[in-house]
Amino acid sequence: MVSTIEKINKQEFQNDLLNWFKEEQRDLPWRKDQDPYKVWVSEIMLQQTRVDTVIPYFNRFIEKFPTIEALADADEESVLKAWEGLGYYSRVRNLQAAVREVKENYNSKVPNTPEEIRLLKGVGPYTAGAILSIAYGVPEPAVDGNVMRVFSRILTIWDDIAKASSRKVFEQAVRELISHDNPSYFNQALMELGALICTPTSPACLLCPVREHCLAFEEGVQNELPVKTKKKSMKHIELIAAVLKDQEGKYLIHKRPSEGLLANLWEFPNVEKSQLVKPKDVLHDFLKKDFRVDIQLEKETLTTIPHVFSHLTWNIDVYSGKILGQVEQKEDLKLVTKEELTQYAFPVSHQKMWKAYQEMVRA
């Protein structure tokens, strides 16, 4: 047990936190009811993504897939298209796989026990705790970065939150303090507090509803917590890509592999640059060798697009050009019209390429 927890008046802490949340909580679409499926979708979307960004995606996704059955029965292409732009696409693939498990094994009802729900693909301790507490009122901890930051300050926990082993410390602390009368509001209040008040830098301590319980505030060390080691330096990759059109006005698109980064998304042909060969020659040789496609590129780049992932950055020089001769279409290589293009799910970087190309054509 965290030794400093004994200094907290548990009942007063819960009351102050819950009363603040009842008054100040944001009006978010997934809070309108406690439907386990909607809570689940929202929590998966909110991983690595800001609330303001998630709201319109959530509304569209639930409109398109309003039930467990609707998402379970949908084809992957339409699901990826609905997720297009949110990134971290493995999230939605795992979500659909898990939803299919729920339909098959649990009669389309999201499990309400920690043991069962954690067996679902992509459902880790945080997501399980969020669904169980918010939708079912089970007093399970839901510990993410926000909650670890809040509790590191309230209880002056100096464990490095970047280490996986630290999560157990925070989960135990939440178990000690969680409201058994209203675990739903308790966990949501901690998340809300971390998002609005107890922010990573310059926490708004004077506005904090649990300031009087906060040991870091009392000791004046709130800006030193949480302890978090820095990530490794980012990897940088230089790419060349092209929007290519054939004589019939169709565009060449390629499907990424089913495993790895941006799996199964569609993209315009692209390849990593070489230090030994001119970029345009690299792309020309790549298309000739891998797809037996001859191309002719324009002299000047159309645009350069930087794109940042959590662990690497792409810098993409984009050209436009035309296809010479025929293309042997396959499952992962297609020629599509401008109208058909909108039906395929593309990474954000390739959506930007298409936008730049259309602006060039209109100019």
Image (cartoon, rainbow, N blue to C red):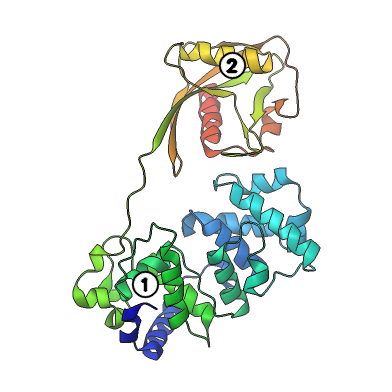
Q: Secondary structure at mark 2?
A: helix
- Tag shown at residue 170: none
Please identify the residue farthest to the left as the structure is shown. 220
Q: Residue at x 35, y 40 (%)?
A: 233
Is tag 1's residue or tag 2's residue first in the polypeptide sequence?
A: 1
Q: The disc labelled 1 sits on which kind of residue?
A: Phe
Residue 25 in view in this figure? no
The percent position of residue 243, horizontal first and vertical second, equals 58, 22
User: Relative to the observer, which residue lies in front, 314 or 243?
Assistant: 314
Q: Residues within 10 Å of mark 1 (few under 14, many from 20)?
A: many
User: Relative to the observer, which residue lies in front, 291 or 64?
Assistant: 291
Q: Residue at x 50, y 74 (%)?
A: 141
Residue 211 in view in this figure? yes
Using residue 262 as the reference point, say whether residue 324 is left or right of it: right
The percent position of residue 242, horizontal first and vertical second, equals 55, 21
Q: Residue at x 52, y 10 (%)?
A: 281
Position above or below: 58 against 138 = above
- Tag shown at residue 151: 1
- The reply to whether discs 1 and 2 touch (Cβ–Cβ < 8 Å) is no
Residue assigned mark 2? 286
Position above or below: 171 against 70 = below
The quarter of the picture where the N terminus appears is bottom left
Q: Residue at x 61, y 19 (%)?
A: 244
The percent position of residue 29, horizontal first and vertical second, equals 57, 66
The percent position of residue 224, horizontal first and vertical second, equals 24, 63
Using residue 159 as the reference point, say whether residue 121 is left or right of it: right
For residue 305, what is the image quadrant? top left
Position above or below: 15 against 308 = below
Q: The disc labelled 2 sits on which kind of residue?
A: Phe
For residue 337, what is the image quadrant? top right
